[in-house]
Image: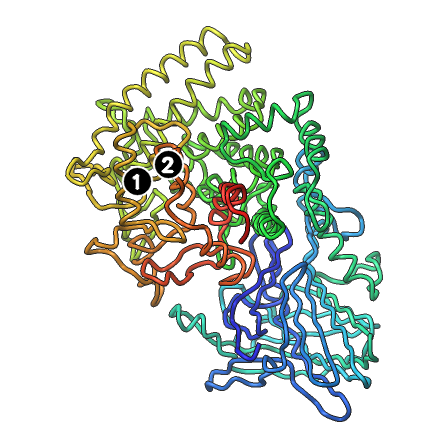
Amino acid sequence: MADLDTREWLLTNGLGSFASGTVSDVRTRTYHGWLFAATNPPSGRTLLISHLEASLEVSGEVVALGTNYWRSGKIEPRGYKLLRSFDLNPVPKWVWSQAHWQLSRQLVMPYALGTGDWRLGTRNWENILTQSPVPNTQSQFCHRLLIQYRYDGTDTGILRLRLLIGDRDFHHQQAVSPGLQFSQLLGEKQLCLQAIISRRFGTPWHLRWTQGEYEPDAVWYWNYQLPEETQRGLGDYEDLYSPGYLTVALRPGDAVTLEAQMGFPDPRQSALTSETFAEAVEAEQERLSQIFGWCKGGRLGAGEQRSRGAEEQGSRGAGEQRSKFISNAQCPMPNALFPMPHTQSLIWQQLLKAGDQFIVYRASITGPTVIAGYHWFNDWGRDTLISLPGLTLVPRRFDLAKGLLQTFGRYCSQGLIPNAFPDGNDEPFYNSIDAALWWIETLGLYLEATEDWQFLAEQFLVVQQIYKAFVGGTRFNIQVDATDGLVSWDALGVALTWMDAVVEGQPVTPRRGKSVEINALWYSALCWMSQWAEKLSELKLGDPVRLAKQARRYAQQAQQVTVSLQKFWNPQLNYFYDTIEPDDRRNSQIRPNAVLALSLHHCGFPEQQGRLILDLAVKRLLTPYGLRSLDRNDPEYVGKYKGNLQERDRAYHQGTVWCWLIGPFIRAWQRFYPNQPLPFSWQPLLDHLLSDGCLGSISEIFDGDPPHAPRGAFAQAWSVAEVVRHIHEWGMESEEL
């Protein structure tokens, strides 16, 4: 590891807090630090501890183990040259060494949902949603990080750990200021810290350690350089404060454990011991094992899996459930019924673990939500609903899926599902035309997997509210055109589809009027509604006569939409028009929305058109990492996602590859080319998962031009979710990585 390796890692805690950095331990982003605490879960993320700058003295020689970029252009010290290995699993671990000594460091961020102390028991969404809600009090939230150093050598080593801290929003850098001070209160193997910002108190937190002597030694370190932010055209340097340092004498085989935790010390908290770190790692392994049904170091056997499935489904046999889930939901969970080689099993576990990092608790709605991506995204309705099948249905987390659908359905307003939630008590943001339609599509997949008809009966009022709003008209002039049954919208200055970049108040891809994937979603929604009304009528979960009439009306409208969808066919290109604009002009740009329109559960397009579209998409849009957002031959195509914020936003949907679109492409391909193999290899994407970008996760986007460098958020929910949803095909067809 002689090179300065800037690939990244991520730890999360289920509340929005995170820790992140690089393999070589150098900070390259504003978002790198060891404890970003979500003070208002999952928002209010505040940097408390940046890192510990370590040095080791052995036999009178002092070596610095840290690595820093400085604004002067220097890299100093160069501890990465002594770094011998890095391992991600089960938790990030670094090993530095020379001839006569070795020092390792590990970090773990304990899962924090619903308990102030993880020793009191692990709570997951599965039992929270079925037993009792999480109290909306900070006392129930525990934002903490455990750090452990372990020493081996021929002589005693003296480890010095200088504490580098801050109190800033995670989007911004910290700078020395007369109005920014830090107070510290030293106790027995414990230090309380709090910023004072222009006479206002910042976020309190404390540090504990198992051995060593702390020396107050307040000093500012100026001008840390953040080169990733330089490339993004953003603020790219900051100052960090050091209140002092810890000195620990370590005999060969000794370890020192530290704990950083938001809030003031609680006298009831368990003592910090040398075993605390291992217990926290064990607790996290056990939590994941309980959720996903794998044994530590392996997966459940077929008998255990079948038993677990039967318990989840009540009296319904697991074999019957499995068969229906495969054929209808099209996203089975690999287990002993789908044997996978050992390497593939580990990849599968890594994907599920990555997916779990996005599922968090939102205090403002006292319910579950999904972080769209790390580092900088919050939760988004559209992203959550598109991610839901891969994050919850595939791993059979049905209670979690139900909780997410309930959460977003509860906030349906004027027929629209929130695109985002505010952090306080303000009204959610409803700037999305498709979130409501994705809610119906995802509800359908949930019902196909569970046959939870009682839940359908409870949610059918929301379904009808969406239908009535779209037919009668709602925000942003969203309304079904009475002449052809297609959904249209017309509002200036907003972008309501997933291609939502806005620069200087103007959408980069406006897509006003009738968008192809929106109307494909509308058609699928009408099919679902007809099917559900008929089902509820049969089960007498409502007025049977009225429901039967509704079923017929929805079916008739779906038939009308089937005919009208042909307005999108472009016979010159053998592709769909992307939009039919309010003045009836057609946009003939080749975009992936045509593929998305073919991928839904109910498809209103004939086989010949579907095949022609996929053939062209393979030539113009398909890459090993997903689909380009625009044909590479288009005059507006931008092949690299780079530059300042405006330049990047202008490129966001103009050729940039979106990984999540690999899922819709696969579903469309399997529908129209069921007997042909996928026209791409999984290998590059799996290599990216294991050894590129954020190790163990999947990036949001990639450059449209080869070599398709990863860009955007380094870990994205729907990227991971869509790979999870379809990777089983690789597992069954391939024998080795």
- Give the total number of marks visible in the rendering: 2
Marks 1 and 2, the one that precedes in the sequence: 1
Q: Amino acid at mark 2?
A: Ala
Name the residue furthest front: 735
Q: Is residue 41 visible?
A: no
**Distance (Cα) linking label 1 and label 2:** 8 Å
Q: Is residue 555 above or below residue 97?
A: above
Q: Position of residue 472 (x, y in %)?
A: 32, 24
Q: Is residue 611 above or below residue 684?
A: above
Q: Position of residue 74 (x, y in %)?
A: 49, 86
Front residue of this view, candidates 59 and 231: 59
> Callout 1: 10 Å neighbours few (<14), some, many (20+)?
many
Could you say which quadrant of the image residue 249 lies in? bottom right
> For the residue labelled by badge 1, is the local secondary structure a helix, a strand or a loop?
helix
Q: Which residue is mark 2?
A: 668
Residues marked 1 and 2 touching at CB (< 8 Å)? yes
> For the residue labelled by badge 2, is the local secondary structure a helix, a strand or a loop?
helix
Q: Position of residue 222 (x, y in %)?
A: 54, 82
Q: Position of residue 254 (x, y in %)?
A: 82, 74
> Callout 2: 10 Å neighbours few (<14), some, many (20+)?
many
Looking at the figure, which quarter contains the N terminus? bottom right
- In the displayed structure, does residue 571 sit left or right of residue 663? left
Q: Which residue is mark 1?
A: 614
